[in-house]
Amino acid sequence: MLASFKSSSSSSEDATENPPPPPPPPLCLASSSAATSAAHHLRRLLFTAADFISQSNVSAAQNILSILTSNSSPYGDSTERLVHLFTKALSVRIGLSENAATWTTNEMTSSTVLRAVHLTANQAILDATETNNGNGALHILDLDISQGLQWPPLMQALAERSSSNPSSTPPPSLRITGCGRDVTVLNRTGDRLTRFANSLGLQFQFHTLVIAEEDLAGLLLQIRLLALSAVQGESIAVNCVHFLHRFFNDAGDMIGHFLSAIKSLNPRIVTMAERSEPWRSFVRE
């Protein structure tokens, strides 16, 4: 939701004698001191740039996009990251980006599909865990968490779920066990998600699970150990986005053992998505 803001009003007597000053230029970001105001300005400028492009007013769009580029970041908060991506896309659209040639149709399509898969999986998890038997605890096992880009929207949805009904049931808490091959990358992902959860006031824990590239048997063992250490009343969701293809070339019944290990967790939901042929991208419970 776009934030709305009002300027401070003077007394009615002053208002009749002195007309209010003109509003600040819409392209000025420095006048916003609050984070919500800055986010509102960024979103408004982004819409304005898109409107200029649709009107073929490239010069005006370039001016706004240059402001957005300097005021957004791929490593900032959710608004800054969103604005950064759309600014880059709009820059490519009008040929402003020097890296436009590197954005192939396949890359754009793949990125769009992945985001759609993430959002669909998140919504399925939210729907499946909306009622947690009076306990708001959710544990997500992400079998290939990478940079963790899937989870900030879900974290924000959980925080909004709590704020919309603060008097009923315990506040939601989230625990993510992230799997990966590089412990440094996992720790950085955990740090970023922890900072984001703190900004939302969301109770959050992050645990790393380092799995070697070909050590699928080790992964199955770790999953069964997680089942033994499950927290009472905690809803479990297992996320298998672009993971199951590792089992496709296995001559044995490793995928059967994998599914059995997942079943031992007694998860509320399992989300799966694959893009490798002959498997089409899908998400299902």
Image: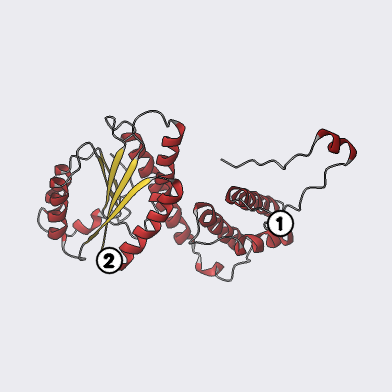
* Residue wearing tag 1: 28
- Percent position of residue 59, x then y: 73, 62
Crowding at mark 2 (Cα within 10 Å: few <14, some 14-19, many 20+): some
- The answer to whether 51 is drawn above or below residue 59 in the figure is above
Quadrant that contains the C terminus: top left
Crowding at mark 1 (Cα within 10 Å: few <14, some 14-19, many 20+): few
Most extreme residue toward the right is 17
- The answer to whether 150 is drawn above or below residue 213 in the figure is above
Quadrant that contains the N terminus: top right
| Cβ–Cβ under 8 Å for marks 1 and 2 | no
- In this picture, residue 68 sits left or right of residue 244: right
Q: How is the image coloured?
A: secondary structure
- In this picture, residue 105 sits left or right of residue 158: right
Amino acid type of the residue tagged 2 in the rendering: Val
- Percent position of residue 53, x then y: 68, 54
**Residue nearest the viewer, comparing 57 with 238:** 238
Most extreme residue toward the top is 168
Quadrant assignment, res 6 = top right
The residue depicted at 15 percent of the width and 55 percent of the height is 222
The residue depicted at 70 percent of the width and 53 percent of the height is 52
